[in-house]
Amino acid sequence: MELHQMGVAELSAGLRNKDFSAVELSSTLLQRLRQAQDSLNACITISEEPGLEQARAADQRRAQGDSAPLLGIPLAHKDIFCTRGQRTTCGSKMLAEFVSPYDATVVQRFQKAGMVTLGKLNMDEFAMGSSNETSFFGAVRNPWDLTRVPGGSSGGSAAALAARLLPAATGTDTGGSIRQPAAFCGVTGLKPTYGRVSRYGMIAFASSLDQGGPMARSAADCALLMDVMAGHDPLDSTSHPQAAGRFSAALGRSVKGLRIGVPEEFFGEGLDPEVAQAVQEAIQWYVREGAEIRPVHLPNNVHAVSTYYVLAPAEASSNLSRFDGIRYSHRSGSAVDLQDLYLLSRYEGFGPEVRRRILVGSYVLSAGYYDAYYRKAQQLRALIREDFRRAFAEVDVIMGPTTPTPAFALGAKSADPVAMYLADIYTIAVNLAGIPALSLPCGFSKAGLPIGLQIMGNYFADELILGLGDAYQRDSDWHQQEPGWEEQ
Amino acid sequence: MSMAWEVVIGLEVHVQLNTRSKIFCACSTAFGAEPNAHTCPVCLAMPGALPVLNEAAVDKAIAFGLAIGAELNHRSVFARKNYFYPDLPKGYQISQYEIPIVGRGHLDVLLPDGIEKRINITRAHLEEDAGKSLHEAYAGESGIDLNRAGTPLLEIVSEPDMRSAVEAVAYLKKLHALVRYLDISDGNMQEGSFRCDANVSLRRPSEPFGTRAEIKNLNSFRFLEKAISYEILRQQDILEAGGKVVQETRLFDANHGETRSMRSKEEANDYRYFPDPDLLPLQLEEKRIERVRVALPELPDARKARFIEQYGLPVYDAAVLTAARELADYYEIVATGQDAKLAANWVMGELLGALNKAGLEIDSCPVAAEELRQLLARIADQTISGKIAKEIFEILFAEGGSVDAIIEARGLRQITDSSAIVAMIDEIIQKNPQQAADYRAGKEKLFGFFVGQVMKASQGKANPDQVNALLRERLQAQ
């Protein structure tokens, strides 16, 4: 196996055995990142020198006897995480020149663990999108089929992992932004329980829904990343006091006796039959291993997308107010007065999807509409949460498809926002409830596109669902398939 | 005026809490630093930065709530007030909207006519201050100083219970005294630590409230009084001319003593309040409230009651002396070991009179409380008379120094030697034989004349009681 084909666990062993150095590893991957840029556009920034510098430091630490498990292993961050001294764009013209004066907590934690940051990954502008086409830095392409989208908003992360440019990446998930691209690109991604991963330094889209999480090529690798990534952060008031966990230590569990809920609402109209079949087969694997299936109902899932598209834009409209052209963000050169400065800077700095959501969000919060939209959506959110509470009284996990279809073609939905929003129909309820969910590869369509299985757990069942994903991956090789993007 | 108008006033007071750090980050709240010296990613609203609530600010809000006998909300919610302004870096202010930390309470206010009036307080909520825009120093440009951005404020909203500018000022003064008593704010009005918006409207008695105007940012008691007085006349003129008062926000121009329109209701922002998802609802446990309650200092009303009880003071005296924590502290030092009523008379009369004349507050009083006590001690031990004491007080106030040193240096010691006083009396009787004869013939009024002559001869130093007794004796004797 070549270096770029190895996952986090293999690389960790190789570095420990001194089969190769962190510098060799990073040099190899930096070269691949550069080479893939033209075909995939996965990166917004490739951190050549700072990356090698960190790799040298990691080798030094190892020489001094440091044996931290992730020491010297490269990763790249979704460009939504602030990195000191390196630009952080959030996929937007608004922040195209922005260099953060501080590191996000997640970035800091990985640095402390000795991981090497090789760059900043492409994403939908301000994480608003399901196809990575709204990025100011251009669309990312799916390594399985360069004419298709990688999903979004963490599309750069998923594409880079699938193309074997990186063994690990960070993503963020507000309505499916880790899981949907993971499914489209055939990689594994965890949206953790809300509050387990610090949001400090992660540029906010919708604060009550945003959650950072790991993306890798296996659930086991995601667990290794979560060991470092999760933990209470006093700088984030919504961070949970018991956020930390021993994720990798919880792997290797048996499936016997597991109660799996399969909601019929996730297998109805609009679901691609190929996706349905692959997902059902994966669930049957668990049954063969001793799990039992119980029907559960999530009757309010039908309201999830509309609830989300009130609440998320409402929070976003306020979160994005700080990009006003006054301090660090894009400032229009043609403004004549203050009003103009605001209007032009924001018009020029934000793309159309971001502007649309700011408008929607401002509308639903405005006097006379708040009760009809925002308050009502909060009530629906409570009902959706209640659906899960009832279901998890009966079952340990809920399984279903991550997405209704495999990756769609570039441009196919860009003109129809509602069609685009419906790509997240199975992922959004999880964010509204705040529970964890994992997406992992469970097959391919006839056209050769990856299909994702989604495993949803109760609050703080992150360890459980990672363990279940790992159990499946020990007995399957969907996650080990490599796309032939270099030949396309 | 054709027929009486009733004035209706409610106040919104912004009190800057005297915590060391800002309400949502660890930056210093110290006043007067270089622009933007006290800033960090949080109060600069850098992307990704998040607020963390300063618990000390919460304790101060609890203390205030307890002091006004308010219902404390065990669960209160921070909300975002959204609007664009260059000195508001996040594009929203974190405040409390639907559920504030402090609910209904009240303040009993002593009015100048001696009547106590209860002013109800609707609510008090925690919020952050904005920064400052600096226009003067930059030609054609504006500077932004975010040092103040994120300093903690408690906004205290009263019911429309005040019926005159005088009542509004009395309420504001009592509130000012209270936050100083509680040590939750330095109350510095020049630096903006204690500022007030006044809602003013007029109506015919017993009719519904009229349309109000809100006068923003009044930062002294005098401005509050002037602004309200101006506003009353302005609205009265409009109403009596058959017009309608427009609901609007007005600014007080201190230079011209008038209020001017800033923006009308139609131009007002839609703030799009919603609960701040970055902050959890604020939960107050009974334990915590109890801990704050136990640590509360003696409050003005309790202190007033104690002054009446312990010092035997009249209600009016006790109210005046406890109106400010510093004044009450001052009085208690003066009264230690002295006649309490005499001490009260001196503090309220001579001292407050002199301060008022000099335009000084009690905390910058040039006469130390210990010196005033010494002065009263010297009256009590008959070293000096009350009249001489007033002279000494004036010297103390103007020049400083110690009471005993002034008595010695200026030879002001009272004459209590009976033979010396008798000698003076005899000399005066001798010089005024006619008056002495008239007195003895029954013209009692002349006694005062003789007292005056003796005091004059002794340069005011003769002990007045002795003078009275000996004079009567000597006048009778001859």
Image (spheres, coloured by chain):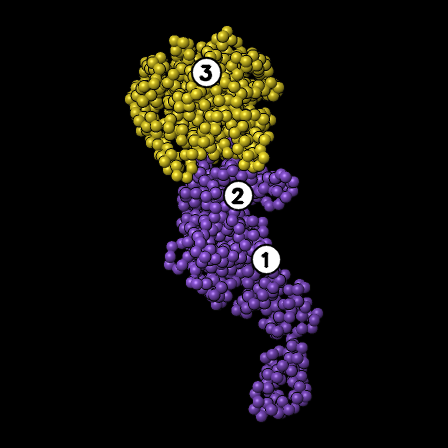
Label 2: chain letter: B
Task: Identify the residue at image location x=51%, y=63%.
Answer: B320
Near mark 2 (Cα within 10 A), the count class, few <14, some 14-19 or many ≥20, is many
Could you say where residue B415 lies in the image, as x and y percent from the top left?
A: 65, 77
Residue A280 falls left or right of residue A318: left
Task: Identify the residue at image location x=62%, y=84%.
Answer: B450
- Tell me the amino acid under the disc marked 3: Leu
Do the dots labelled 2 and 1 sit on one chain? yes
Label 3: chain letter: A
Residue tagged by mark 3? A410
Residue A63 visible within the image: no
Could you say where residue A354 lies in the image, as x and y percent from the top left?
A: 48, 27
User: What is the number of the mark on residue B129?
Assistant: 2
Look at the image and give the colour of chain A: yellow
- Tell me the amino acid under the disc marked 2: Asp
- Tell me the amino acid under the disc marked 1: Asp
User: What is the number of the mark on residue B363?
Assistant: 1
Near mark 1 (Cα within 10 A), the count class, few <14, some 14-19 or many ≥20, is few
Q: Is mark 1 on a helix, strand or loop?
A: helix
The residue sitting at the left extreme is: A295
Task: Identify the residue at image location x=41%, y=19%.
Answer: A439
Do the dots labelled 3 and 2 sit on one chain? no
Distance from Cα at disc 3 to Cα at disc 2: 47 Å
Q: Are the two marked residues, 3 and 2, in contact with CB atoms closer than 8 angstroms?
A: no
